[in-house]
Image (cartoon, grey):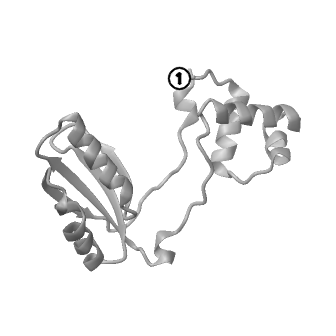
Amino acid sequence: MPNPKLDDIDCRIVQALQADGRMSILDLAAQVGLSPSPCARRVRLLEEAGVIKGYVAVIDQEKLGLPVSVFASIKLERQREEELDRFGAAVQRWPEVADCYLMTGQRDYLLRIIVSDLAAYERFLKDKLTRLDNVASIESSFALGQVKRSFSVPVELGVS
């Protein structure tokens, strides 16, 4: 189902689960004004439609000894489909890469890389990223701090 139509109750369910994915069906039902059975059915339908893709724990990377976030802009020598697929497959294997976006403009990819320190990033560059034969250039920027990080999608902006 490409773009399922969400009514007001569906939107409230999605917003509530974005705020607390561990919320019980009883609590969720009370919050959105439904009885538990119809609420559970709606959640299941939202999952089946792909609106809800999964549930995760949000982890503090610093508490795991990984305080450094690096944003790397990657330019490829060739942008043919097979080259893009090869780069994407490599990135999928690297645990340091938290996010990867295919971009428009001067650069082809934007990566968010999580490492313990500058030396770990240097090892990542030397052992992984620069070993890909199609990488023409890499521009790295180090995050000084995180101003905002949200895992929520603005539901109210996407529903017409």
- Residue 117 vs 49, above or below: the answer is below
Instruction: Using the image as rendered, state which of residue 148 and residue 34 is in the foreground.
Output: 34
Could you say which is closer to the camera, residue 132 or residue 151?
132
Amino acid type of disc 1?
A: Pro
Q: Is residue 33 above or below residue 107?
A: above
- Position of 131 with respect to 159 (left or right) is left
Query: Is the residue 53 above or below the residue 3 in the image?
Result: below
Residue at point 26%, 46% (across, down) = 86
Mark 1 lies on residue: 2
Identity of the residue drawn at 63% across and 46% down? 18
Query: For the image shown, how many numbered marks are present on the structure?
Result: 1
Q: Is residue 64 left or right of residue 136?
A: right
Q: Position of residue 141 (x, y in %)?
A: 23, 62
Quarter of the image with the N terminus in it: top right
- Describe the element under mark 1 as helix, strand or loop: loop
Q: Quadrant of residue 46?
A: top right
Residue 37 position, x and y percent, is 87, 35
Quadrant assignment, res 119: bottom left
